[in-house]
Image (tube, rainbow, N blue to C red):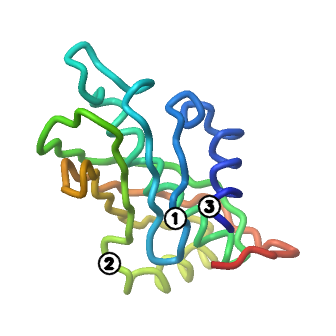
Amino acid sequence: MTPLELQAYLHTHIPLSAAMQVEVVKAGWENVLLRAPLAPNINHRETVFGGSASALSILAAWSLLHLRLRVSGVTTRLVIQSNRMDYLQPIAGSFSARSSLEDADQWPAFTRLLKRRGRARLVVSADLLAEGEVAGSLSGEFVALGYEKATTCTDST
């Protein structure tokens, strides 16, 4: 799945991403990097609205799992169950979120459990970035529900 394909998917299926003007910078197996401008995400203090910062981080984390499952040829419903967001500093410009698996060694167990039970959980982290510095962090637990092996999969990393 290319960055443009993921961006089109997000804008079509998660309209908030279009309203936030989310851009997919990188869509890879190890991480996903999303970026958004300040203007549609501004608060009354002329910094990034906390909800927008959280939404971008959740979108980056969700996108990583979505991409990995698609590349693996798995169709499932993917939802966030819980998350913790820490805001370390205000952001006065464009901002990004870079996601990664909290423990990459858990991926094989996650996919095995999903295949066997039709349900599995995995924790994904995202760093909120501004001007090259970490401005916040997210830890989110995601649940994949249902397992269906896709008949065809042309995605690549």
Q: Amino acid at mark 1?
A: Lys
- Tell me where residue 8 appears, x and y as whole percent: 70, 48
Q: Amino acid at mark 2?
A: Asp
Which residue has dot 3 on it? 3
Q: Is residue 132 left or right of residue 99?
A: left
Q: Residues within 10 Å of mark 2 (few under 14, many from 20)?
A: few
Q: Earlier in the sequence, mark 3 or mark 2?
A: 3
Question: Hey, what amino acid is under mark 3?
Answer: Pro
Q: Position of residue 59 (x, y in %)?
A: 47, 48
Is the C-beta separation of discs 3 and 2 under 8 Å? Answer: no
- Give 25 or 105, whichever is nearer the viewer: 25
The residue furthest right is 151
Quadrant of the rendered image containing residue 67: bottom right
The image's mark for residue 26 is 1
Distance of mark 1 from mark 3, alpha carbons? Answer: 6 Å
User: Label 3 to label 2, Cα distance in Å?
Assistant: 23 Å
Q: Which quadrant holds residue 69?
A: bottom right
**For the N terminus, which image quadrant?**
bottom right
Number of other residues with Cα within 10 Å of mark 3, as a class: few under 14, some 14 to 19, many 20 or more: some
Where residue 144 sits in the image (x, y, percent)? Answer: 56, 60
Q: Residue at x 56, y 27 (%)?
A: 19
Front residue of this view, candidates 42 and 156: 42
Badge nearest the viewer, 3 or 2: 3
Q: Earlier in the sequence, mark 2 or mark 1?
A: 1
Q: Which residue is mark 2?
A: 103
